[in-house]
């Protein structure tokens, strides 16, 4: 099993920045892809960005150019740098991990709240 713990959420003004972190522990040797998702009240959970073990990334159109996903060399931490935040980015952000594509949601973190408001 893999355990995921997110951190870094909080309250930020529009146009501001936040950096989310997710640390994985457990049987991480079989983790191939890690991702960030978000869910706003009344909305479906949506995929924000993903990163594969080899470094390939993908970002949702709504965040492309503003958010950047990255990981550390040990492949046990994933980050989401969020710049130029908008009120519509307000959501609970979840980290996930999976053993292969497209199975990116085998394991989930508890979520961290991001609120963008003036």
Image (cartoon, rainbow, N blue to C red):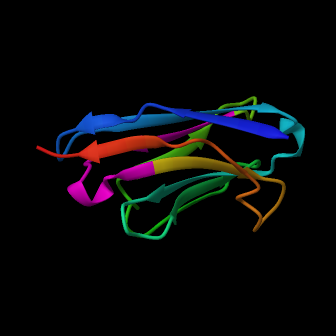
Give the residue at the far left of this rendering.
Answer: 118
In the image, residue 37 lies at what x, y percent? 53, 56
Which image quarter is the N terminus in?
top right
Front in this rendered view, residue 100 or 68: 100
In magenta segment, residue 84: yes
Q: Residue at x 17, y 41 (%)?
A: 13
In the image, residue 107 lies at what x, y percent? 73, 49
Q: Residue at x 35, y 43 (%)?
A: 114
The quadrant holding residue 41 is bottom left
Q: Is residue 42 above or below residue 9?
A: below
Q: Is residue 35 above or below residue 12?
A: below
The reply, left or right, for residue 114 in relation to residue 35 is: left
Q: Residue at x 37, y 68 (%)?
A: 42
In the image, residue 28 lies at what x, y percent? 83, 37
Can residue 83 be seen?
no
In the image, residue 89 lies at what x, y percent? 32, 56
Q: Is residue 1 above or below residue 90?
A: above
Front in this rendered view, residue 35 or 84: 35
Which image quarter is the C terminus in?
top left
Give the residue at the far front of this rendering.
Answer: 42
Can residue 79 be seen?
yes
The reply, left or right, for residue 115 in relation to residue 52 is: left
In magenta segment, residue 14: no
Q: Residue at x 70, y 58 (%)?
A: 105
Front in this rendered view, residue 4 or 77: 4
Query: What stretch of residues is rendered in magenta?
Result: 77-92
């Amino acid at each position: 099993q893999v355990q995921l713990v997110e951190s870094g959420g909080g309250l930020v003004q529009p146009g501001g920045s936040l950096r989310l972190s997710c640390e994985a522990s457990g049987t991480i040797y079989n983790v191939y892809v890690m991702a960030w998702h978000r869910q706003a009240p009344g909305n479906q959970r949506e995929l924000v960005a993903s990163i594969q073990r080899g470094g390939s990334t993908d970002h949702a159109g709504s965040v492309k150019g503003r958010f950047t996903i990255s990981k550390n060399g040990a492949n046990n931490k994933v980050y989401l740098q969020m710049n130029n935040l908008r009120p519509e980015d307000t959501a609970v952000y979840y980290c996930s991990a999976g053993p292969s594509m497209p199975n990116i949601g085998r394991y989930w973190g508890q979520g961290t709240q991001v609120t963008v408001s003036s």
